[in-house]
């Protein structure tokens, strides 16, 4: 599976095959796990290295925003909640991207807010709601 994911990532080239042009997501290389385990490989295959890097940059910016919100909290309880959300988000994202570029073994980790997975989407939606609430009124107690 990893070999096929790397083929998908590499075949996108600099500018990609275009939206819908991925062979990986239609199961040509692997069983259809492209919407969960290897969604970032599909993104790099369709959008290419340039826009795929922009996509990764968006996640790095989200990390920065989460840290900024965590540091702006007035109470230790709110700070710990936000740091927990941030660390969970960073670890899960790193595991997904790392598995798709052969840094770590493929574990089936979903990419937050992108991969198809009901419980993952629900959990990250709840965490995002908590982060937004803490972001709006950092001085109030939650």
Image: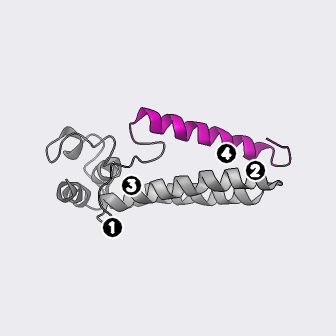
Q: Residue at x 38, y 37 (%)?
A: 116
Q: Earlier in the sequence, mark 4 or mark 3?
A: 3
Position above or below: 87 against 22: below
Query: Considering depth in this image, is 44 or 131 the residue closer to the camera?
Result: 131
Residue 99 in percent (x, y) is at 33, 59
Q: Earlier in the sequence, mark 1 or mark 3?
A: 3
**SS at mark 3 in the image:** helix
Q: Which of marks 2 and 3 is nearer the N terminus?
A: 2
Main SS, magenta region, reads helix
Q: Name the residue under label 4.
A: 131
Q: Does the magenta stretch include residue 135?
A: yes
Q: Earlier in the sequence, mark 1 or mark 2?
A: 2
Q: Mark 3 points at which residue?
A: 96
Q: Mark 2 points at which residue?
A: 78
Image: magenta residue range = 115-142
- For label 3, the crowd category at 10 Å Cα-Cα, with few meaning under 14, some 14 to 19 and many 20 or more, is many
């Amino acid at each position: 599976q990893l070999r096929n994911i790397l083929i998908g990532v590499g075949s996108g080239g600099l500018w990609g095959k275009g939206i819908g042009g991925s062979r990986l997501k239609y199961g040509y290389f692997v069983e259809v796990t492209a919407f969960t385990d290897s969604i970032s490989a599909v993104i790099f295959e369709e959008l290419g290295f340039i826009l795929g890097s922009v996509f990764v940059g968006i996640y790095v910016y989200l990390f920065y925003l989460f840290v900024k919100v965590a540091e702006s909290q007035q109470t230790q309880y709110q700070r710990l909640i936000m740091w927990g959300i941030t660390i969970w988000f960073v670890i899960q994202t790193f595991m997904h991207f790392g598995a798709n570029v052969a840094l770590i073994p493929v574990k089936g980790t979903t990419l937050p807010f992108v991969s198809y997975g009901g419980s993952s989407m629900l959990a990250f939606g709840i965490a995002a709601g908590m982060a937004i609430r803490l972001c709006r009124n950092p001085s109030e107690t939650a």
